[in-house]
Amino acid sequence: MTTTAPGVIARLAGRPDATALIHCRRGTSRTVGRGHLVRSCQSAARALHRAGVRPGHKAVVMTRDAYDLTVVAYALCSLGAVPVLIEPRAEVRRCLRDVAPDVFIGEPLAQLGRQVLGWGRPHVQVSLVTGRPPLALGRRLVTRAPGGGAPAPLPREPDGDELAVIAFTSGSTGRPKGAEYRYATLAGQLDALTALLDPRPDDVLLAGFLPVAMLGPLLGLTTLAPAVNHLAPARTPPQALVEPILEHRVTQILASPAVLTLIAGHCARYGIALPSVRRILSFGAPLRLHLAEALREAVPDATEILSVYGATECLPVSAIDDHGLRATRVRPPAGQTGTCLGRPLPGVHPRILDAGPTGIGEIAVTGPTVSPAYHGRPDADAATKSVTARGVLHRTGDLGRLDDQGRLWFLGRKAHLVTATGSALTTEDIETTADTAPGVRRTALVGLGPAGCQRPVLCVEPLPATSPTAALAAVRAALEGHPDGHRVDALLPHPGFPTDPRHNSKIDRPRLAAWAAERLRGRTR
């Protein structure tokens, strides 16, 4: 067996006795050392090669098990194959049509879906099952190496331009697309995350999102993968998050607002403190102040709480702590609306394209964390990518502006701009004001009707203890102080917004707009 490319194994080789991964499942946890993880990756690589996996093969990996995902992805890289990561609830058939994978590796449920729904047909040549599958589902890939023994010699380091991973977007704002990460892209992302995390030797990182569990060991961190419900993170039992934080003395948390809401709520409900936590990073959707303040109640005063901005195609881009976020909300700079995303990370260069008189335009980014292309989607590349002196410039689809301090501001998705007759309302501008109303969990502005003459409707999700009537009244009062508040044509209470499957934090506005249109059908303006 020959090996090509993969520096990921080399990154794990140091400190073989240190803990790489703490894997939680069904109330138990399993600790995996770095040396054992390396041996498991190399053992899995040999099994993959025997099964027919070769350099350059594109291999879909579909499992909700953090350990299996980590071992399989690293093993594929060590063969020079390319892991393909797809959201389990995404448009899998269309994603696989874009990729045309040679290999499909998945847990039993994913393999059942492949067989019944024909995923990957006719491209898949090698199919392997992780976990403990029934025999009918196919050949099993063992991901746990036998104990003892030294790791095999390390394969060569890859060239930075070699394709490392294809990671699909969640599809929460359109059809999912496969972002290509070169090895240089991965290195840039790891460098940026290292700058954000400022890791220490004794740090324990709680990964609230599955791919973070895969990246954590590459950052040199002991990584705790809690038993998150990856098909619906917001439905995870809160104790499955809080108890491991206390047991393993977690120092850093990376999670979406939905997962952080579970942690903060559980701590508040039972009077639990999290004394070991020194940094919290929120990503996947803007961090609201009420959530930051709820988290503050559970952690030491010195804990840093960061809202991190980025996308699958460029992660991370910028960050701001909750103190800075609070300052921009209490005393917003003149002319600034929306949510402050903070200053760009080192080496990352945001630009505002097609800006109007207010300075608002589309956020575009260059830098080492930017994916250079989409796989099999030249149409998407043409719409979002261009080559500049600083490298590939990626259009994010987000509206924003840069202020005179070099900070980036977010105004919402370009596709979600509400254009009424004679006016245009950005979602983040209206919602950051409406979300301050007491008794309100969150709000969402949607436009009903064709662009240019849409009806602006604000949907309101009350907190459980607040009546819909009281929540609507509080939002009306908050909007009275907003210069465009009077343009919102209707307020509708909603019991719980539909959200993206990956983070349960981004609001599914097309579904919400369809619901609002049905509710308002027949009403007069």
Image (cartoon, grey):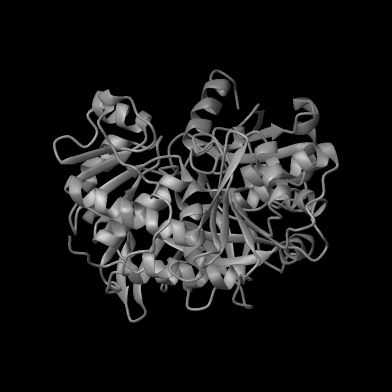
Residue at the image point whose x is 40% and y is 41% from the top = 87
Q: Where in the figure is residue 157, as x and y percent of width and height? A: 30, 73
User: Could you say where residue 32 lies in the image, as x and y percent from the top left?
Assistant: 52, 53
Q: Quadrant of the N terminus?
A: bottom left
Q: How many marks?
A: 0
**Residue 343 shows in this picture:** no
In what quadrant of the picture does the C terminus appear?
Answer: top right
Residue that lies at the very extreme toward the right in this rendered image: 271
Judge whether 377 appears above or below 192 on screen: above
Instruction: Choose between 156 and 185: the one closer to the eye.
Output: 156
Asked whether residue 16 appears in the rendered view, the answer is: yes
Q: Residue at x 76, y 51 (%)?
A: 295
Identify the residue at image location x=15%, y=41%: 125
Foreground pick, 445 / 242: 242
Q: Position of residue 155 (x, y in %)?
A: 28, 69
Residue 112 as seen in the image, left or right of residue 457: left
